[in-house]
């Protein structure tokens, strides 16, 4: 077929397709309307079923308000509020490491201890700290408690966000058969959420001092943090990383 014949054929095909779409437009609109009405009925039945099975009294108005609230929260970027200034936070972390290494007996810690000592001296000189805090000092204990609440609170809130997103993604994924395009994309999003959740768990468990507030567990694991209803998650506000 010559190029001009190909163009003629493609033009005829597209003109025919356009005419057929225009002719069938009313039928297609009616079919889509019928499908939309059936989906609306199914959705209303699902909502009624959820309301009936809910352990507490819930109305459609409540669900609509939750939907609006969820959309507003999804559009908001979480703001981290630091209660301890940066240099105090760094100083207390270095002090914990310093006293931990100093109490040890292994020679392999000597170089690390020297580096921490130099870092502490520079920090104390820069901020004109007259006397180094000892572990028994009230200022040390107060600052450590504030830093602990801030660090662990931020990581718990991060894990809570990932667990909720993960739960939604898994719920959506169950609606589609494995191998379907959207199911594959959802699986990748779940894997990314798992990765971020494991990173938060790793950072939490690597904190070098025991929890200073009873609400914080000493360590956390993947199974419990995956549960959006984990009791620890309910000890924190939605907007700030502080214990309520």
Image: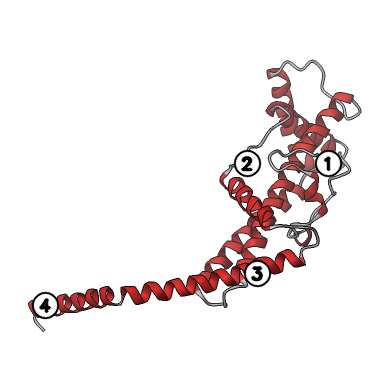
Disc nearest the viewer among 1 and 4:
4
Distance of mark 1 from mark 2, alpha carbons?
Answer: 27 Å
Distance of mark 3 from mark 2, alpha carbons?
Answer: 32 Å
> Are the residues flagged by discs 1 and 2 in contact, CB closer than 8 Å?
no
Q: Residues within 10 Å of mark 4 (few under 14, many from 20)?
A: few
Q: Which residue is mark 2?
A: 78
Q: Which residue is mark 1?
A: 209
Disc nearest the viewer among 4 and 3:
3
Q: Which residue is mark 3?
A: 46
Q: Secondary structure at mark 2?
A: loop
> Are the residues flagged by discs 3 and 2 in contact, CB closer than 8 Å?
no
Check the picture and name the quadrant holding the N terminus: bottom left
Residue 109 image offset from top left, x and y in percent: 78, 41
Q: Residue at x 77, y 50 (%)?
A: 233
Q: Residues within 10 Å of mark 1 (few under 14, many from 20)?
A: some
- Mark closest to the chain's N terminus, 1 or 3: 3
Q: Residues within 10 Å of mark 3 (few under 14, many from 20)?
A: few
């Amino acid at each position: 077929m010559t190029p001009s014949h190909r163009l003629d054929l493609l033009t005829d095909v597209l003109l025919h397709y356009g005419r057929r779409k225009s002719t069938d437009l009313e039928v297609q609109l009616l079919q889509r309307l019928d499908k939309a009405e059936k989906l609306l009925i199914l959705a209303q039945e699902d909502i009624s079923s959820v309301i009936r099975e809910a352990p507490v009294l819930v109305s459609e108005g409540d669900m609509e308000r939750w939907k609006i609230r969820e959309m507003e929260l999804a559009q908001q970027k979480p703001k981290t509020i630091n209660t301890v200034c940066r240099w105090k936070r760094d100083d207390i972390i270095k002090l914990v490491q310093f006293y931990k290494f100093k109490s040890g007996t292994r020679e392999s810690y000597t170089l690390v201890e020297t580096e921490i000592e130099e870092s502490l001296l520079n920090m104390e000189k820069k901020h004109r700290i007259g006397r180094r805090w000892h572990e028994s000092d009230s200022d040390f204990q107060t600052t450590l408690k504030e830093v602990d609440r801030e660090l662990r609170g931020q990581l718990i809130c991060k894990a809570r966000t990932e667990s909720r997103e993960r739960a939604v993604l898994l719920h959506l994924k169950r609606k589609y058969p494995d191998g379907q395009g959207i199911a594959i994309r959802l699986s990748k999003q779940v894997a990314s959420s798992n990765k971020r959740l494991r990173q938060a768990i790793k950072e939490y468990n690597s904190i070098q001092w025991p929890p200073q507030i009873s609400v914080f567990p000493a360590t956390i694991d993947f199974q419990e943090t995956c549960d959006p209803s984990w009791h620890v998650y309910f000890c924190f506000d939605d907007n700030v990383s502080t214990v309520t």
